[in-house]
Amino acid sequence: MSKITVVAKIVAKKDCIEAVKAELLKLIPPTRKENGCIEYNLHQDNSDPAVFLFVETWESAAAIEKHITTDHYKAYAKALDGLLEEKVVNKMTRIA
């Protein structure tokens, strides 16, 4: 099975940028330790600090599904409830 790349765009409400950033940063260390996580990197837009982008590489779709059931992922989702303008997650397969 092919590796899966996840590109997750998270847009914070303008008055919640620092709170969202803090929660996103908390998610990184435990996620990088998960079985199946190859790469898990967070980016912040240079011109719009409310825009964050996770670029992730996972061994399989099953590893991603397990990730979203972890306690740290559930805590992140709960903490960001009401703080976001938008969240879009694309699961992709490299073709070239």
Image (spheres, rainbow, N blue to C red):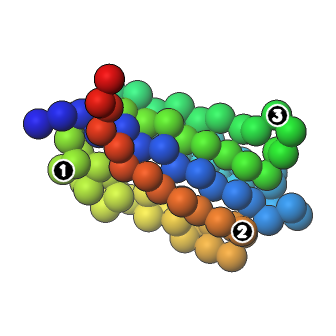
Query: What is the x, y in percent for residue 47?
Result: 86, 39
Image quarter of residue 19 = bottom right
Q: Amino acid at mark 1?
A: Ala
Cα–Cα span, label 2 and label 1 = 28 Å
Residue under circle 2?
85
Query: What is the x, y in percent for residue 17?
Result: 80, 54
Question: From what the image shows, is residue 10 above or below residue 25?
Answer: below
Q: Which sits earlier in the primary sequence, circle 2 or circle 3?
A: 3
Q: Provide the secondary structure element on which disc 1 rests.
A: helix
Query: What is the x, y in percent for residue 50?
Result: 79, 52
Image quarter of residue 93 = top left
Could you tell me which quadrant the N terminus lies in? top left
In this view, the residue farthest toward the bottom is 82
Q: Which mark is residue 62?
A: 1
**Residue at point 31% right, 61% down?**
69
42 with respect to 19 (left or right): left
Residue 96 can be seen, yes or no: yes
In this view, the residue farthest toward the front is 96
